[in-house]
Amino acid sequence: MVKIIQINQTGKAHRIDGRSCEDALFVSEAPFVCCLADGVSNSTYGGLGAKHLVDSIGHYLTRENVLSRFSEMDAQSVRQDFVSMISQVTNYLCQHHPNSKPNDFAATFMACFIYQDTLTIVHAGDGAIFALHNTKKEVDPVILSYPDDNQFDQVYHAAHKDTISRLRVLRLRLSDLKGLILGTDGFTNAYLNPSYQGFDSESLLEAFDVRSNQELTDLVKNVHIREHQITDDISAIVVRFQGQVTQSSVSHQEVLLKMPEPEPVKREAPPLERQPSTQKKRKLKNHILPYVFAFLAFAIVIGLNLYVYFSMNTKLDELSSQLAEQQTKIDRIENLTQQNQLDLDSLMELQPSSE
């Protein structure tokens, strides 16, 4: 059995802008399938792309015999099929939104599913996946998949042209695992070091210890929002493995996208390279945003002070000019007065004296 705990929360930045959460998730316990996606912030319909990816691929994976078919594939074949499914979803969205292009629906994507005693993980883009080993003694968590972005803070989203080479496919024995966490960057950035060289395992253990959706919500409120001041959307799936996982089919909703069987991509994967992406994720780090706002406020205050200063100087110059003009007029009047007095004195001297 598995216990699945989840959170899908709109971040402060989106609430201020009046936008809805651009993260999306899909969860099925039997068969066990979890999908998580995060819409790229500067894409026009990133949130819509994320929702369709998890709903369409998630429902597809719960179909009868699909997981058994994936269990017989090697990692490259799994990668090719997922790239094909992602492409089908994106093309479908482009057809129903005139004048749109695939990058308009850019979203990161991660999924995990179980067949018999094997857990398969698929991951494209940022966010991260952590695991807790199944041992009797207490051990630190391990990271199974790091965020995938480059030195320009640009994310390689699911529909990126290099996904065929960058999509990560991992397989683990279910019996080796006690817990699993899939999280978008809004959740995992609270635990990862800024350079992605390691993570805070002690704090992460608290996330593995949550027992309910409410406990996970409280954890996010205290750790992510209050302590780390994260304003991004926050979504995560915490899985606690408890004994044998049943492999039965489920009655699910009608698939939003009636995808055909994915066709294998007929080309070899190019070597793994770090190339700049054309899509930029909301990579203004969340904990820096308050400082950015403070800097903008400071700049506005300085600008207002400079405006007042130069305005006062202009007024003073105008007053000085007016005073100078008045002083000139006064000097002229004094000169005329003196001249008139001299003329009057001269006239008085010319008059004869009376005897």
Image (spheres, grey):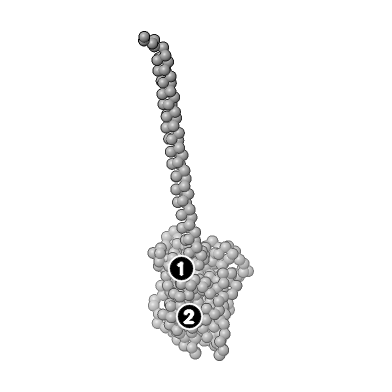
Indicate which disc residue 231 carries. 1
Q: Callout 1, which amino acid? A: Thr
- Viewer can see residue 353: yes
Q: Earlier in the sequence, mark 2 or mark 1?
A: 1
2 and 1 marks in contact (CB < 8 Å): no
Residue most extreme to the right: 271
Name the foreground residue: 136 vs 122. 136
Is residue 143 rendered to the left or right of residue 104? right
Across and down, in percent, residue 324 comes to: 45, 33
- Viewer can see residue 262: no
Across and down, in percent, residue 82 comes to: 52, 73
Seen at 44% across and 32% down, the residue is 327
Indicate which disc residue 247 carries. none
Choose top left, top right, bottom left or bottom right for residue 131: bottom right
Query: In this rendering, is residue 337 above or below 157?
Result: above
Q: Secondary structure at mark 2?
A: strand
Residue position for label 2: 238
